[in-house]
Amino acid sequence: MNTTVRHSLGQYDVEVTGLRVVLDGLGDDDMIVTDDHVRAAVNLERDCFSIKPGELSKCLAVYGEVMDWLAQRASRSSRVVALGGGVVGDLAGFAAATFMRGVRLLQVPTSLMAMVDSSVGGKVGIDLAAGKNLAGAFWPPEKVQVPIDALGTLPSRHFTNGAAEVWKYAAIMDPALFDRLSSKPLALSDPNPAETVMRCIELKRVVVEGDEHETTGGRATLNFGHTVGHAIEQSMGYQGILHGEAVAIGMVAESLLGERLGLTDKQTTERIRGGLQSQGLPIKLPEGLDSRNLLEPMRRDKKADRNGLAFSLVSEIGTCKLLRGVAESDVLSALEKL
Ligand code: GLY
């Protein structure tokens, strides 16, 4: 199962394969960046840079450590291998984009989240104290190798976390996939997870080829649930909640916002809420989180401009659009209905 993603500097293949094939194919020029869970799960014995799992590692300090590690062993002909989930892919990808002004990158996503979303499209970056993904680059990989058997090493909470992005693709672009998920949520035991993974990659390919650098608003529609989701993650200091969990809450909140703005009908919100709940994802703000505290991080969202906040909103299942200049009072009212 393969696809090819075209971009302004060329193209790259995304191929579904197995972990052993990927690891056996690595050579001396490959600089592996991974995390402690993945390193243990794949029994990686060769030299690598291994980070503590979790969003807190996607920071300037750890980025600096990766760069120093590369400086001691890599050259311009080296290739950075991002072996892990979304955090590893973003951090290692940003190191690849900036080490010696850019070296080759191989994305090897081992989490469902990274397989269906973050490893494809060339976005790499780290978080700053002021906000998520605020330092970054567009740095297309040389290739994406998806080791589908790595899903078997995922704890179930992390599998469900990645399922949130699958629901997102279904909600914004694929009514048939949404129907399929609604009748049977994703499960680790699914006989053919590669088919769903490739479907999401294919949907993302179409969007990123149309708006690689997120300038026309097309790519920003992939942010459904993310404006609120990123604000939740940030308000909680990236602790106690995973990215997909925050995005799930964000998708419900943003559907309620769409209703308030006359774009989303009530039935669509209910289908999204019911589907995410059936997948085991959270659909309410975490206990103790004051919705007013989400406004400040939302103001620093990359889609916001001087006209106000911007949201990707679903009008009906399978169709979405970017709405700019959204008033904070409308956002607060939607959050209060969660
Ligand atoms: N994860 C959204 C994007 O790549 O644009």
Image: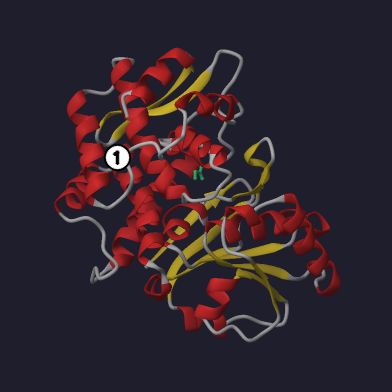
Residue 22 visible in the displayed image: no
Query: Which residue is labeled 1 in the image?
Result: 171
Mark 1 lies on a secondary structure that is helix
Residue at 33% x, 55% y is 199
Residue at 51% x, 53% y is 118
Q: Is residue 136 left or right of residue 313?
A: right
Residue at 36% x, 52% y is 200
Residue at 20% x, 33% y is 270
Which image quadrant is residue 262 in? top left
Answer above or below: position of 224 versus 159: above
Q: Position of residue 3 (x, y in %)?
A: 42, 60
Answer above or below: position of 203 versus 333: below
Which image quadrant is residue 301 in? top right
Q: Residue furthest left?
A: 183
Quadrant where the N terminus sits is bottom left
Q: Is residue 115 left or right of residue 106?
A: left
Q: Position of residue 264 (x, y in %)?
A: 27, 23
Q: Amino acid at mark 1?
A: Ala
From the viewer's side, name the closer residue of 192 and 229: 229
